[in-house]
């Protein structure tokens, strides 16, 4: 099972300094244009769960542009026993304090 969280919930987690891995699933060019502070870019088009193995023992929050891809990947990672959440509605409208623009 995986959680779906809002950007507000994610900001609260980051404000509290909660240890988690942010993973941006968008293509590298979109990541370079803007991303969440501290996010790791793992462009994800093909189902290759092995790319996430190094984060197996850490809580992860996945995001993409609109939220659909991160939900699918979160489901697959949760089935493999990883602790993961998906950012609802993606990063498309976020303009908050954790946004890094290229």
Image (cartoon, rainbow, N blue to C red):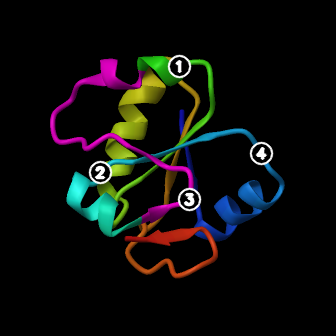
Residue assigned mark 2: 69
Query: Which numbered disc, 4 or 3, marks the residue closer to the eye?
Result: 3
Residue 18 - label: 4
In terms of sequence position, does the residue under pointer 2 or pointer 3 come before the other?
3
Residue 13 - label: none
Distance Cα–Cα, label 2 vs label 3: 20 Å
Instruction: Decide if residue 90 is on the left or right side of residue 83.
Output: left
CB under 8 Å between discs 3 and 1: no
Distance Cα–Cα, label 4 vs label 1: 17 Å
Residue 63, image quadrant: bottom left
Determine whether the residue tagged by mark 1 lies in a helix, strand or loop. Answer: loop
| Relative height, residue 90 to residue 94 (above, below) | above
Q: Position of residue 37 (x, y in %)?
A: 56, 59
| Mark 3 Cα shell of 10 Å, populated few (<14), some (14-19), many (≥20) | few
Q: Position of residue 28 (x, y in %)?
A: 24, 52
Determine whether the residue tagged by mark 4 lies in a helix, strand or loop. Answer: loop
Distance Cα–Cα, label 3 vs label 1: 21 Å
Please give the name of the residue rendered at 15% of the width and 34% of the height, measured from the top-left corner.
Answer: 46
Residue 6, visible in the rendered structure: yes
Distance Cα–Cα, label 4 vs label 2: 24 Å
Residue assigned mark 3: 37
Distance Cα–Cα, label 2 vs label 1: 19 Å
Query: Which numbered disc, 2 or 3, marks the residue closer to the eye?
Result: 3
Residue assigned mark 1: 56
Query: Which numbered disc, 2 or 1, marks the residue closer to the eye?
Result: 1
CB under 8 Å between discs 2 and 3: no
Q: Position of residue 57 (x, y in %)?
A: 61, 18
In terms of sequence position, does the residue under pointer 4 or pointer 3 come before the other?
4
């Amino acid at each position: 099972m995986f959680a779906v969280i809002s950007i507000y919930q994610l900001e609260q987690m980051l404000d509290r300094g909660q240890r988690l891995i942010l993973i941006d699933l968008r293509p590298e060019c979109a990541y370079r244009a803007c991303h969440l502070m501290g996010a790791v870019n793992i462009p994800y088009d093909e189902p290759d769960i092995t790319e996430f193995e190094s984060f197996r023992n850490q809580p992860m929050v996945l995001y993409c542009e609109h939220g659909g891809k991160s939900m699918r990947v979160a489901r697959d990672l949760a089935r493999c026993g990883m602790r993961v959440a998906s950012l609802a509605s993606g990063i498309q409208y976020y303009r908050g304090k954790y946004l890094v623009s290229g």
